[in-house]
Image (cartoon, rainbow, N blue to C red):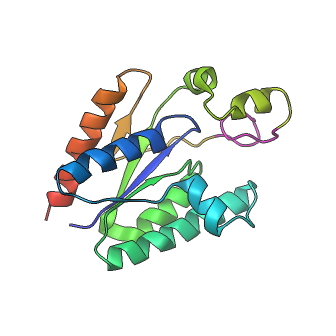
Amino acid sequence: MTKIFWFTGLSGAGKTTLATAVAAELKTAGTTLRILDGDDVREKWHGHLGFSRMDILENNRLIAEMCVEAVENAESVLVPIISPYEEGRVFARERLGGAFRLIYFDAPLSYVENSDVKGLYAKARSGVINDMIGVSASNPYQVPANPDLTIDISKESEAQSVARLVNYVVTEINDR
């Protein structure tokens, strides 16, 4: 059955890394999943949008609409995206209905700041980036109340997280 797996969490929480690993593992098993990475989609199709609350919500809305098309084409999709606001996640869930699954990447701010793969947290702390999601008091990350699955890469290895995600995705796709 077609599903949309909406990965939400702070920047650097492992969303894209795990989406890529899950897609690769399932591809070798004969299941193809599309990945709509929030950063890639923004760069390729929504580059006119900034990072204000309204622009982030609009980017989330546009990605949800892309997912509607995927569902219509019977494609299951992994969507690694920060999606920091409950309002955006609720819209996606309502728009995608029974195909939507919310995966929360619950990595503590201290963990993602220490790894800081993209250098964004250092820029936020030095004042180069204002209103960094999860860092700025004016732009908090709103923790989802009821995710369908929670992953915390600070408490389990990448391999353990991938295995849990693969199991979850396969179970959900095969659920009729």
Horizontally, residue 130 falls left or right of residue 37, namely: right
Residue 135 in view of the camera? yes
Residue 131 within the segment the image draws in magenta: yes
> Do we see residue 146 in this rendering?
no
At horizontal 57% and vertical 68% (from top left) the residue drawn is 61
Q: Name the one closer to the observer, 175 or 41.
A: 41
Q: What's the magenta bit mostly, secondary-structure-wise?
A: loop
- At which x and y percent is residue 32? 27, 60
Q: How many marks?
A: 0
Quarter placement of the C terminus? bottom left
Q: Position of residue 118 (x, y in %)?
A: 65, 35
Q: Residue furthest right?
A: 127
Residue positioned 68% across, 41% down in the render: 133
**Residue 112 rendering spot, x and y as whole percentages:** 58, 27
- Image: magenta residue range: 129-140
**Vertical order, 120 against 25 (above or below):** above
Q: Is residue 110 magenta?
A: no
Q: Quadrant of the N terminus?
A: bottom left
Q: Is residue 104 above or below residue 107?
A: below
Above or below, comparing residue 88 to residue 169 in the picture: below
In the rendered image, residue 23, in percent from the top left (x then y), is placed at 32, 50
Q: Which residue: 54% across, 52% down?
A: 86
- When the figure is inspected, residue 121 is found, relative to residue 72, above or below; the finding is above
